[in-house]
Image (spheres, rainbow, N blue to C red):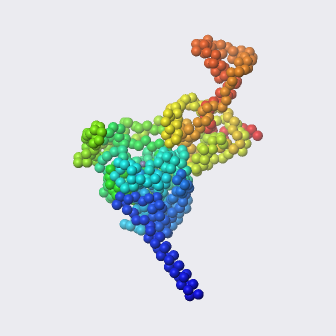
Amino acid sequence: MKKQLLASLVSVIIALSLAAQERNAAPVLRYDENHSLTWEEAISFYTDLDARYPEAKLIEMGMTDAGRPLHLFIISGDGEFDPETIRRKGKAIVLINNGIHPGEPEGIDASARFAADILSNREGTKRYLRNCTVAIIPVYNIGGALARSSYWRINQNGPDEKGARRNTRFLDLNRDFVKQDSRDARAFAAIYSYLDPDVFLDTHTTNGSDHQFTVTLIATQPEKMHPEMQDFFRGRMLPELYDRMKTAQKNEMVPYVQYTDRGEIKTIIGFEEHAYYSTGYSALFNSFGFMTETLVYKPYPERVEGTRQFISELVRYTSLNHKEILRLRAEANLLTLNAGEYVLDWEQDTTRWDLIEYHGYSYEETLTPITGRKTGFYNHEKPYTDTIRYYNYFNPSVTVTVPKAYILPFAWEEVIERLQANGVVMRQLQNDTTIAVETYYIDSFEPAKRAVQGHYVNSKVQLRAVTQEVDYLTGDYIIPLNQRANKYIVTMMEPLSESGFFTWNFFDSFLEGQDWYSVWGFESHLKKLLDHDPELRAAYDRARSEDERMAADPVVQLQWLYQNTPVSELEKRTRLYPVGRIMQAGVDIHDNK
Ligand SMILES: [Zn+2]
């Protein structure tokens, strides 16, 4: 008996010490030693925070292409983790996404540092949680993070090892936000519609420039917001974030340095934000979106610290201005429900710019050390400050009328899955039905010669709109445009959208057409038609006499007859884009039952 008690006592002690060891085994952040957290270390770091703080929770949400689940870490001041309840309490939600390009890992370490700091109330920052909940995706591209090497991004100044850019399926996840070929993107979409964040940040590293700044910022395109939200963003939120980085953090930040010619930087051009990028995606849901891009040549600890400072400022700002942010977003969401027009594409306004202070390095010419090629470099011995132009205004270039609803045949399963993953509400036809809809014919387009992201992207689309009655089948989907995901729906369903399903080849099979005539017996069938229809006969004769090419070529003559006689029913379906646009509320729907 005594022996047994002793034995169980021993096992309790062993278990306790193992548990203690496990707790102690939480990884220590070592970015100041040029080490970035591995995926396993990141998850164990957040698991430890979850165990230690009631205000923290680590959850799994969805599967990734790496066969491992995506994690989401939520920090909530009152321990309330349900987003709907959080919103009802009038708090704003910030979502931070890290390691989308795991070779650019500063956000992975910076978010871990930030989470530990705010939970432990370092410098009194816990007070920001009163009005703001922070959600963190510790590592988004898990497959890329697992393929760790010291040779990725070879020109980058640390860390000693980093992940690969593409995921396990070789997809660049920062092109996959809307078409969602990866499980990763579908899991992300589920997180996004679950949280519906007011503010969104995606963390990166840039190798596109060289200058004195450590942190550069891509802010979402202001024109995509409604006017009051845009004024707030341009006039208050952005200036304060820039100012706080300069004065409070002593780490002046600059807009993402995008320039046309290598050499001395005289202007910066605003980022063209397609919906397939992270902030393009967040703009579809009226969030305030940001990407930090820290400079590749700065030492890793400085880049992590710069990213952490921006995260802190973003959370501080969101917390202090939560009421205004929530009000503007609620208004934007309301306007989205009723918008009659939608801009599919934008072009830079070359006549408008702002002046900004730029801290650069002189550009000098030199020869490369091995091949002796002529090249240039930014001389760090020669810093300078200049006032330069920043072009960040855009004008609409493609606008569409928003229909009352789209109608999408049941057949297009991959499209339906993606709509569902983005929280799109649809209803299915209960009977075979004929509906008068606006349809598109794709008159011409150009598929890419090389695949991008596994797609031979369609561009240069020319289309023609025709209103006609179309037969639909039981189970086809009606997608009303009176919902939160309106912008996503229009972006994806319109063939002129560079981010849409047509562009990314989801609908390509319809381009091959349905059926075709056979020349065998076709003429004797046509002869009967012409004999009974003198008008048609006259039109045919006229066409043949007016068109030399047609007169000389029997195939062209048959083609004319095919397109202009009642057999053209087949032609009517050729190149007919499968998505119909219902333009009027309460449109006549004839039940075919
Ligand atoms: Zn990146």
- Residue 470: tell me if it is visible: yes
Q: Is the residue 377 above or below the residue 52 in the image?
A: above
Residue 389: x and y, percent? 32, 41
Where is residue 206 drawn, in percent x and y? 38, 48
Tell me if residue 507 comes above or below residue 529 in the rendering: below
- Please, which residue is most extreme toward the top here? 545
Q: Residue at x 49, y 73 (%)?
A: 19
Residue sitting at 63 percent across and 47 percent down? 426
Q: In the displayed image of the protein, which residue is found farthest to the left?
A: 381
Along the line of sight, the residue nearer the viewer: 153 or 554: 153
Q: Quadrant of the C terminus?
A: top right
Image coordinates for residue 91, horizontal then vertical, percent = 49, 60
Q: Is residue 208 above or below residue 541?
A: below
Which quadrant is the N terminus positioned in? bottom right
Residue at the spot x=47%, y=46% of the render?
172
Q: Nearer the viewer, residue 376 or 573?
A: 376
